[in-house]
Amino acid sequence: MTLQQFNALPAAEAERALLACCSAPRWARVVAARRPFPSVEALQAAAAEALRDSDLDDALEGHPRIGDRVAEGASAREQAGVAGAPLDVLDALARGNRAYEARFGYVYLVCASGRSAEDLLATLQARLANDPATERKVALEELTGINRLRIARLVRSS
């Protein structure tokens, strides 16, 4: 849809569209309420500004594990670099995902678009060394990047 069409949606429909980008209801309500936006960039900036730590848990419910074969839609497209990875890398990602979830209590969230499985694995292994507070901040930054990409796909300027 165009940005103009997004701006003209009833609030509930705009929220539903935003929930397809990020499954955090509070965030979607706040962003939808700030319409109209003069540009996609302004929408993306408002979306980034509206995101709170309290939204992270809701948002994580909408994200499959990196390398998970059941990823679909936007997640499958964003994880395309993992699809053809060697089995040993996929196995290491699965082990890393389990270790990450045991350490932090939620799925490893990373902006995977355009990245290889090996790169995502190296990032996962490095982030396992973070303390929980630091990792939560990193996950929120990654979510901001994911939202930026998904919003760009949701709306276009003209």
Image (tube, rainbow, N blue to C red):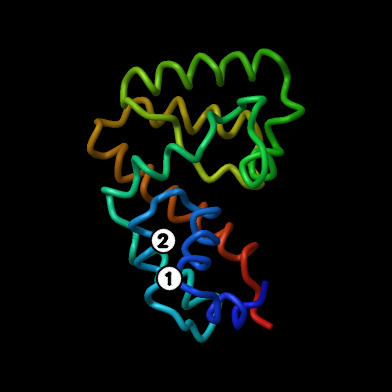
**Residue 74 image position (x, y, % from top left):** 64, 47
Q: Residue at x 32, y 25 (%)?
A: 105
Asked if disc 1 and disc 2 are in contact, CB closer than 8 Å, the reply is yes
Question: Residue at the spot x=49%, y=40% of the render?
Answer: 62
- State the image coordinates of residue 132 (x, y, percent, origin top left): 25, 32
In screen coordinates, is 13 left or right of 88? left
- Which mark is on residue 152? none
The residue shown at (37%, 25%) is 128
Q: Farthest residue in the bottom direction?
A: 38
User: In the picture provided, is 82 more to the left or to the right than 45?
Assistant: right
- Distance from disc 1 to disc 2, alpha carbons, whole Å, reads 6 Å
- The x, y position of residue 101, in whole percent, is 38, 22
**Picture coordinates of residue 9 (x, y %)?**
54, 75
Q: Amino acid at mark 2?
A: Ala
Position of the C terminus, as image quadrant, is bottom right
**Residue of label 1:** 32
Tag count: 2
Mark 2 sits on what residue? Answer: 28
In the structure shown, which secondary structural element does the residue marked by tag 2 occupy?
Answer: helix
> Can you tell which quarter of the image residue 118 is in?
top right
